[in-house]
Amino acid sequence: MMKKILIIEDEKELAYSIELFLRKENFETFVIFDGDKALEKFYNLTPDLVLLDINLPNKNGWEICKEIRENSTLPIIMMTARDSEFDELYGLELGADDYVTKPINLKILLARIKRILKIDGKSNYYFEGMSFDIRTLELSINDEKIELSPKEAQLLEYFIKNKNFILTREKLINEIWGFDYDGGDRAVDTLVKRLRKKLGKYSDRIKTLRGMGYSYEEKKI
């Protein structure tokens, strides 16, 4: 699956140059210019990483970073023309994962994105005896490799990246099958059932929320 990056930047020329560069590097990109619309786009999209400018119209980057971090652990890289220690420390205190100053060196930005997303072949998810390599989509439980179908792997990846979120069946269909899928909700329930079976004692991390959908939660076994 291509990694999705949300670019929240009001300088259109810069935003489009970042978007074009990242698309050439096989990322799926989305651009928002206005702070007011950024959070709505974030919740609808659920990206893998956010590039967030500080000086935005209507709602600044600090406010957006704070609200995203209150509801999600997805990585955030702050972007600003203000090269000050205070700005950098404040952004990190709000929960940003990294900080870059303008003018932005696109190659350095790419390296930081890859580092944060751990696009290097290493497993970047481990909890208790369960590990999942988000790059190769390989699952291991207590050092035993578990074979997943492509759809099962995509579903587990999406659950892990959006843990503790309520994920509706419609959203799961759009993410796993695509917006043009014309089947019913039962496909989601069947796929969840298959994934739970393969997770074994970890299956109860996937919670069914009656009338809403599913949520992936972590707890000690």
Image (tube, rainbow, N blue to C red):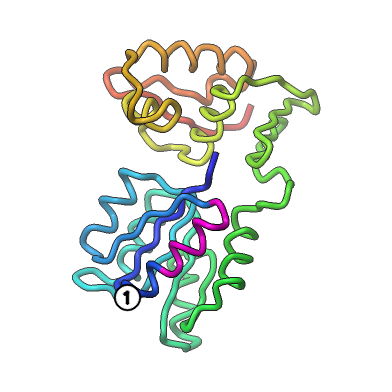
Residue 188 in the image, given as x and y percentages of width and height: 41, 17
Residue 142 in the image, given as x and y percentages of width and height: 77, 26
Asked if residue 63 is among those painted magenta in the image, a careful observer would answer no
Q: Which residue is drawn at 65% across and 42% down?
A: 135
Quarter of the rendering containing residue 109 = bottom right
Secondary structure under tag 1 reads loop
Q: Which residue is drawn at 31% across and 18% down?
A: 182
Q: Image check: 201 left or right of 91? A: right
Q: Is residue 74 above or below residue 34?
A: above
Residue 70 visible in the snapshot = yes
Residue 184 in the image, given as x and y percentages of width and height: 32, 13
Q: Is residue 61 above or below residue 200?
A: below
Crowding around mark 1 (Cα neighbors within 10 Å: few <14, some 14 to 19, many 20+) is few
Q: Residue at x 49, y 66 (%)?
A: 77
Majority SS type along the magenta span: helix
Residue 146 in the image, given as x and y percentages of width and height: 72, 21
Tag 1 residue = 11
Q: What stretch is highlighted in magenta?
A: 17-26
Q: Is residue 200 above or below residue 3?
A: above
Residue type marked 1: Glu
Q: Residue at x 42, y 79 (%)?
A: 80
Quarter of the rendering containing residue 9 = bottom left
